Image (cartoon, grey):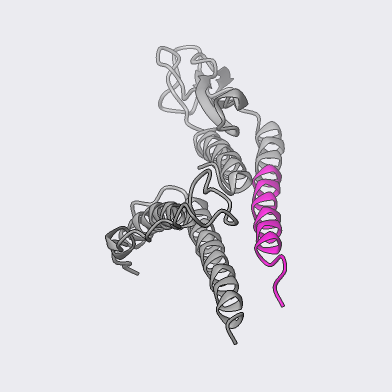
Amino acid sequence: MTIFSAIGIAGTGVTVYRKWLDAVADNVANMNDAQSTSGQVFRARYVQARAVDYGTGEGGAVVAGTALGDPKGRLVYEPENPLADREGYVRYPDIDLGSQMTQMIMAQRAYQANLTVVDRAKDAYQAAIQIGKG
Amino acid sequence: MTIDAVGAVSALPALPPISASDSSAPSSSGTDFGAMVAQGLQRLQQVQDNADHLAVQAATGSLTDVHDYMIAATEANLATSLTVAVRNRALESFNEIMRMQA
């Protein structure tokens, strides 16, 4: 898409931040998944974005992959938990809710910013189409 | 929202070339207007197809990104406006030339 490229480029940014929001949602949804000490806990998802090379004529951002957190998580002393081992420990994913919330706000704001770019680019192109009218 | 394939333009007979004896007319260079309009319509067709495809996905629930459809629809809207603007401008010029006889 060479014409109206600003819209397409901003669109790739929106997709990246949508995926980031999905990752945060996944992390928050699974942050209390208890596991026995012998098992692996939920691994936090970290979206890795990178630029699409502008030299190719495309531009924009793309999700290159997802990095995963520590499968060992953190040990919590919960002797009443049926999953607890002999010493009374269970494993929880090492996800900090505060950090996830920060990431969520960053992703949400960046999502909105990219949508604003789409909107403004649309206005600009429309103004260009209106040149000489009336 | 189905839009029929644009076929009539390519089916139109080509305009006869301006005779060589008319030295006042500049020799045609680059792409001629008809080809440009046909190209524009083809691009418009592509954009509309993409928007239609995503609209079907939105209706059937297989659309993963809401903004993808909205952006495609916006692009289709802009491309249509642009094509219509070009057509109107061409028509205006043509009418202006036709009025020269009066």
Which quarter of the picture shows residue A36?
Answer: top left
Residue B28 vertical position relative to residue A65 in the rendered view, above or below: below
Q: Does the magenta run of residues contain A67?
A: no
Residue at the spot x=55%, y=66% of the render? B81
Report the span colored magenta: A109-134
Q: Is residue B84 above or below residue A108?
A: below
In front of the other: A17 or B85: B85
Residue at the farthest bottom position: B102
Q: How many marks?
A: 0
Image quadrant of residue A126? Answer: bottom right
- Against A64, residue A85 (above or below) is above
Whether residue A111 appears in magenta in the rendering, the answer is yes
Where A62 falls versus A8 (above or below)?
Answer: above
* Of B35 and A99, the residue lying toward us: B35
Image coordinates for residue A129, horizontal then vertical, percent: 65, 63
Image location (x, y in percent) of residue A26: 50, 37
- Magenta: main secondary structure equals helix
Quadrant the C terminus of chain A occupies:
bottom right
**Residue at the location (30% across, 59% down)?**
B60
> Viewed as shown, does residue A99 lie left or right of B53?
right
Can you give x and y, in whole percent of width and height, for residue B48 in the image? 40, 58
Q: Residue A112's spot in the image, x, y percent? A: 67, 50
